[in-house]
Amino acid sequence: MYAVLDIETTGGKFNEEGITEIAIYKYDGHTVVDQFISLVNPEREIQPFVVNLTGINSNMLKNAPKFYEVAKRIIEITEDCIIVAHNSVFDYRILQTEFKRLGYDFKRKTLCTVELAKDLIPDQPSYSLGKLVRSLGIPVTDRHRANGDAMATVKLFKLLQTKDSSKKIILSSIKEAQNPKKLEGKLIDIVEDLPAVTGVYYIHKEGGDIIYIGKSRNIKRRVNQHFTAPNSKSKKIQLHVSHVTYEETGSELIALLKENEEIKRLKPIYNRSRKRTQFTHALYAFKDKNGYINLKIDVADGRKHPITTFSNKQSAKHFLEHAVETYNLCLKLTGFTANIPEKPCFNYDTKTCFGACKIEEPAADYNARVQQLIDKNSYIHKNMIIVDRGRDIDERSAVYIKDGQFEGLGFFNLNYQINNLKVLESIITRMENNRDTQHIIQSYLRRHKNLKIIELLG
């Protein structure tokens, strides 16, 4: 649990500042579950430059509560939380100073979004909150007011969580948890706390290490299956589980890609039996001596460049049968009929093949239809964004393809964020392009034909 906060002060000498406004959002790693926002009477003068910056003046604070009147609420809302702030050293010092004046020793763990951003989003021109969120396309209102800056920090922290492929943020949170859930009578409690949403889940042993990663369209139901199944792997998971964390993705495509990337990166002990590849067959193209493009289903070969890949031979065959019908292709040139010279394919007799098998249809005409099929089912040399569901109703997910290579994925709320290439490349979480990611994306596109695709100018 996190307490994301921002504090405005009077300015002045070091450790003599007073709080003029505070905003705290209690954040469970997914949504805001509580909040506290208040002006505070600092009982001291506000520096003129601070008045100009924040718009908060002494007149506004005459009837505001003094710090001792809000101190209990601050303790309650931050209890068992890690404090998150942009330049947390400053905000935490100010809080500790105010509590010290009351004779109370205020101690909390902290995370700084400045330091996290420098690590996870390197090479930004500035890491000040205003300039950073602007460069990432994150909307911010009431800049230099506690509520506006705290909410901007929540949105920034959510983005940083998405980009945290090594799971440093989650692991640090688990290690600070005071009441880790263990096996004894707690499996039901763990499942009860999980949502029935699409995403990736992480099963941790005591101490925080991840022992299993999975994806599901219903995380609660899938984890419950792990905890009730009698097979050997599930029993080992049941024995060692301490926590289950998750990342909601909204999109199954995002979940598939994140699961694939993070299993390879983190190598959890109970994922090691997973097959190295998720596909067995592929569709290849080649030109024959007469200049016609032939299509062929074959065993997937990493040394070759397929049009698309399949999980098994049957699904590949079904796909090509549908393509023959859709694009009026020749059964001989797609491998369904033996290529006997001078003997036409069956579809020639039914007028659905236009004579490529008898070298009657011009190769250019036939190849144009084959190329339509290739273009539709392959993203080689393409620059595009695949837009799918997000985690909230006003959010969308984006899978970024650059020059035919999978670059990474991210989430956005405003079209500005993906139409501006510089912003897009900042909010994207970089991922490895490999045969598995190509198969995941291509097979997903085949199954979801109505996905929004944004073509980018090369």
Image (cartoon, rainbow, N blue to C red):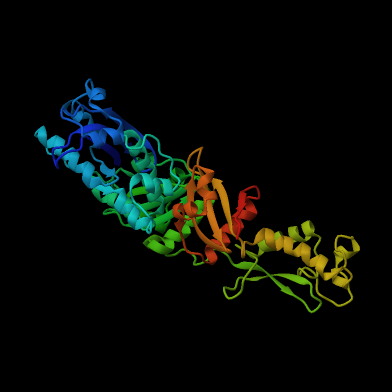
Q: Looking at the picture, how far across and down is residue 167, in whole percent?
A: 35, 55
Q: Nearer the viewer, residue 140 or 85?
A: 140
Identify the residue at image location x=38%, y=61%. 268
Is 358 on the left or on the right of 278, as rendered?
Answer: right
Q: Nearer the viewer, residue 23 or 245?
A: 23
Give the quadrant of the N terminus: top left
Say above or below: 359 vs 192.
below
Q: How many marks?
A: 0
Q: Where on the picture, by quarter, is residue 194?
A: top left
Q: Nearer the viewer, residue 425 or 235?
A: 425
Is 44 on the left or on the right of 402, as rendered?
Answer: left
Q: Where on the picture, by quarter, is residue 280?
A: bottom right
Q: Looking at the picture, how far across and down is residue 230, in whole percent?
A: 42, 53
Say above or below: 374 vs 115.
below
Q: Which residue, as the protein is rendered here, is positioned at the far left? A: 103
Q: Where on the picture, by quarter, is residue 49?
A: top left
Res 236 visible: no
Q: Looking at the picture, how far across and down is residue 446, in whole percent?
A: 64, 55
Give the quadrant of the C terminus: bottom right
Q: Nearer the viewer, residue 46 or 134?
A: 46
Q: Looking at the picture, how far across and down is residue 32, in whole percent?
A: 36, 36
Identify the residue at image location x=73%, y=60%. 372
Identify the residue at image location x=43%, y=56%. 231
Res 390 visible: yes
Q: Which residue, as the protein is rendered here, is positioned at the far bottom? A: 289
Q: Which residue, as the protein is rendered here, is positioned at the far top? A: 63
